[in-house]
Image (cartoon, helix red, strand yellow):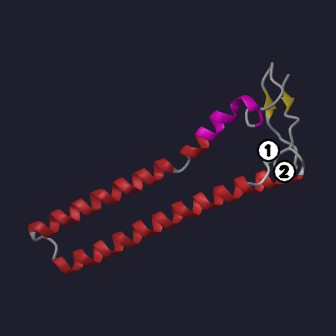
């Protein structure tokens, strides 16, 4: 018989995760899995970026070969290159936005934990010099 996880979610709702036999928490709330969860979260979204990066690399390589062989005129190739540059800047903006959102989420969780007295304790300060 499976048990429901007793740990509340960040938003205060009940966790609906099932607790494996012999454990007290579900996978997502089990302190023993903290490192695994962080490692998996840090990999999130990187596969897609890699695929897009490879696609743009192939597109630029193909475009360069077409210009060099005379199949594509330099001016349209220049416009295409500019558009590819815009796409790269957009990808970089999206990456930074995602990183910022993740940092804000982590900061919110730390602030919430600190306000409930569950967060890390402040470092003891020594006498001023």
Number of residues whose C-alpha sits closer than 10 Å to that of mark 1, classed few (under 14), some (14–19) or many (20 or more): few
Q: Position of residue 11 (x, y in %)?
A: 84, 52
For this view, does 87 lie left or right of residue 116?
Answer: left
Ranked by sequence position, the earlier of labels 2 and 1 is 2
Specify whether 70 is left or right of 99.
Answer: left
**Quadrant of residue 61 within the rendered picture:** bottom left
Q: Let me know if residue 105 appears in the view.
A: yes
User: What residue lies at 47% left-to-right and 64% top-to-bottom?
Assistant: 92
Q: Report if the CB atoms under discs 2 and 1 are less than 8 Å apart.
A: yes
Where, by quadrant of the figure, is residue 15 drawn?
top right
Provide residue 85's location: percent of width, then percent of height: 35, 70
Q: Which residues are magenta?
A: 29-39
Residue 104 drawn above or below residue 28: below
**Residue under circle 1?**
120
Q: Residues within 10 Å of mark 2 (few under 14, many from 20)?
A: some
Query: In front here: 84 or 118?
Result: 118
Q: Which residue is mark 2?
A: 114
Tell me the quarter of the picture where residue 4 sits.
top right
Q: Is residue 124 magenta?
A: no
Residue at image coords 79%, 44%? 120
Q: Residue furthest top?
A: 22
Foreground pick, 11 / 19:
11
Q: At 80% from the left edge and 45% from the top edge, which residue is drawn?
A: 124
Mark 2 element type = helix
| Secondary structure mainly formed by the magenta segment | helix
Residue 51 falls left or right of residue 38:
left
Q: Quadrant of the C terminus?
A: bottom right
Q: Is residue 11 visible?
A: no
């Amino acid at each position: 018989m499976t048990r429901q996880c007793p740990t509340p979610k960040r938003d205060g709702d009940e966790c609906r995760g099932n607790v494996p036999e012999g454990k007290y928490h579900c996978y997502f709330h089990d302190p023993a899995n903290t490192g695994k969860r962080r490692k998996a979260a840090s990999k999130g979204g990187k596969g897609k970026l890699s695929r897009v990066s490879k696609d743009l690399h192939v597109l630029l390589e193909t475009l360069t070969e077409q210009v060099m062989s005379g199949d594509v005129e330099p001016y349209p190739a220049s416009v295409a290159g500019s558009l590819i540059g815009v796409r790269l800047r957009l990808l970089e903006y999206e990456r930074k936005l995602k990183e910022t959102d993740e940092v804000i989420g982590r900061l919110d969780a730390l602030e919430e934990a600190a306000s409930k007295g569950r967060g890390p304790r402040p470092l003891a300060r020594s006498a001023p010099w």
